[in-house]
Image (tube, rainbow, N blue to C red):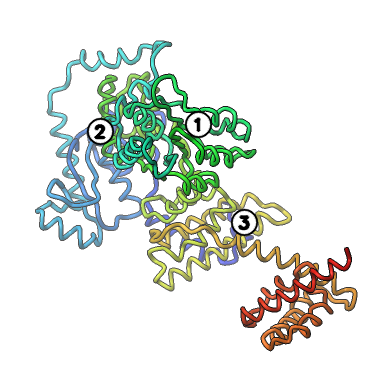
Amino acid sequence: MPQKKIDAFCSRREYIEAIYFRSIETTPTKTEPPENKRTTNNTVPMHSDALGIKSTPNCLDGISFVISGEFDGDKKQKYKDFILSLGGLVRHTVTSKTKYFFTGKNPGPAKTKKAKENKVKMISEEEFREIVEKQSANTKDLPKESPKKRKESPKKRKEPLPVQQELWTKKYAPKKISEIVGNRAQIEKLRCWLRDWQSEPSKKAALVSGQPGIGKTTAAHLVCKESGYTAYEMNASDYRGKKDIEGKIGELSRSGKGVAGKTAIIMDEVDGMSAGDRGGATELLKTIKKTVVPIICICNNRQAPTTKTLADNTLDLRFAKPDARMVAARIKEIATAEGIEYDTNAIEQLVIRYGSDIRAILNTLSVFSTEGCRLTYGKSTEISDRGRKNTEENLFECIPKIFSKNVTFKDRADLYFVDMAFVPLMVQQNYLSCQNAADIRTVSEIADVISLSDTAESAMRGKDSEWSVAPLHSVLSCGIPGHLAGSLRKRTEFSRWFGSNSKQKRLEGVLSLFTARAAKVSSFSTLTARTEYIPFLEKLLAKEINSRNTEKAQALASSYFLDTEDLFDVLMECEKTPVDKKKKAEYSAKKNKKHHLEKTKVK
């Protein structure tokens, strides 16, 4: 961002820079691997040049570290990546299996206590350097593998893949329920529901929801297969119309005629019915109520309007992403079966970066297997960045990431671009629910920065459309507030701005209508109406209603056309004079009765 832009749109530039650079210094940043350098056995692994430590590949293989305390700049993240790139393990908790407790300034007291109890060696930065150099020297002295062995496996993988080769996602798909990774409890609930369906089911359909690639459809098919059902899979997003559901799905659900034995219907992507819905969602609900066969609905987006309604009328089963260790173990088995040489940390890195999405990991590995390289930590980072899908599309997923201490400052600011209008509003709504909200100084700093972000947004959406200010707006609205606020302590709340804005627009419209109607007997602007007429009239009306002077209140309202199109009820929201609910209801009933009689006379 050019300095001129900062000067133009932020009068308190020095204040912003102070917070911004303080955030950068204390937040880890990602360091990209050196360009145009191939990773071979003689090259220095990632971050070794930046840290100035000489090392050899896998010299820390299997050695477990716990890092705690404060380090200069982004050194903490660099040390973590450096250890992982050399085959070491970085854990969050100190246990008896921890080899070294790597400390900076002011290490955590709880971790320090555990390290002493478990007799874990505490090391400083200088001692860490010595350990790496010593381990590197020991690794160099080990006998090297024969050239034949090094060439055999890569040669096989360098051959082009056969055209008929089966996709890995299909080849290694679970063949029975016990082979599915994770969600055992939810799968068991689905199995029990399907087993008891013929007798007297509590719900006629089940809704399986969860993120993509975690085995929802596979689980549905295997449960049907092992329960003796013939499963018919249909994509609900292809059947959005009422006639489609009634004709193609309704007939099967009413007759229950399968190829052999019992029949079950699997409706995939039911959340896709929300887009361009032509009565399909309503018809699906009717079909579920009348069905004589079990229906299993599957969706990714649990918050879609269609799925929210379905959840109330079905067995609601929410699948969570499987444990990273379980996924890593399964991926290692597949990599070994395919002859891929890998570092343990490399597989774990893929699992973390893909969010335990087994399908996406297998697709990435199948492409990587053609390169004939060893899968190292650095390589896994590279290929996951290249092929990883955007997992921050959902507002409710990206907001906790903005407030997470494990996310870099740059990534916080980048999450702003998921939705440049909504994300800042969500940050404003949720920052008071964060860890540091109890500190009034921190809250004041965040409020000041958000206020400045409004100035930048005004420039972006103003006459001149200065969209070049967007990077600055991302830092002010998401980057700095996310860093200062700390971790989110409650469930993500949707921004209340939308409700308030909707109410404001409605009241503005009613106020304009009131001004136009009252112009028959008086002349004043909407501003005068809001600041002078409305407060006075509202107090008079409230007084008459509370005194049960219904006729007088009606006469006063009619003289300013407040009875027309129910203007009175809406305008009463503008002020806060207390009105007895029973008396107000009595007034409204008489007013409506009179209005009805007048209409009848006209007819």
Residue at position x 50%, y 56% in the image: 478
> What residue is pinned by disc 2?
329
Residue 66, compared with residue 136, is above or below; it is below
Image location of residue 401, percent across then percent down = 42, 51
At 42% from the left and 62% from the top, the residue drawn is 484
Looking at the picture, how far across and down is residue 99, in whole percent?
14, 46
Image quadrant occupied by the C terminus: bottom right
Asked if the residues shown at circle 3 and circle 1 are in contact, with their CB atoms under 8 angstroms apart, the answer is: no
Q: Are marks 1 and 2 in contact (CB under 8 Å)?
A: no
Residue name at image x 59 percent, y 58 percent: 6
| Residue 468 numbered mark, or none | none
Secondary structure at numbered mark 1: helix
| Quarter of the figure with residue 505 | bottom right
Counting from the top left corner in percent of width and height, residue 36 is at: 41, 28
Q: CA distance from mark 2 to mark 3?
A: 53 Å
Q: Nearer the viewer, residue 24 or 553?
A: 553
Query: Mark 1 or 2 closer to N-term?
Result: 1
Amino acid, disc 1 = Ser
Outermost residue on the front side: it is: 199
Of tags 1 and 2, the one toward the viewer is 1
Please give left or right for residue 264 compared with residue 111 in the image: right
* Residue indicated by mark 1: 253
Q: Which residue is mark 3?
A: 4
Neighbour tally class for label 1: few under 14, some 14-19, many 20 plus, Cα within 10 Å: many
Q: Taking the image as drawn, is residue 163 in sight?
A: yes
Three-letter code for the amino acid on which mark 2 is drawn:
Ala
- Between disc 2 and disc 3, whose residue precedes? 3
Residue 383 in view of the camera: no
**Horizontal relation, residue 129 to residue 28: left or right:** left
Image coordinates of residue 83 in percent, x first then y, are 25, 41
Q: Residue 217 appears in which quarter of the rendering?
A: top left
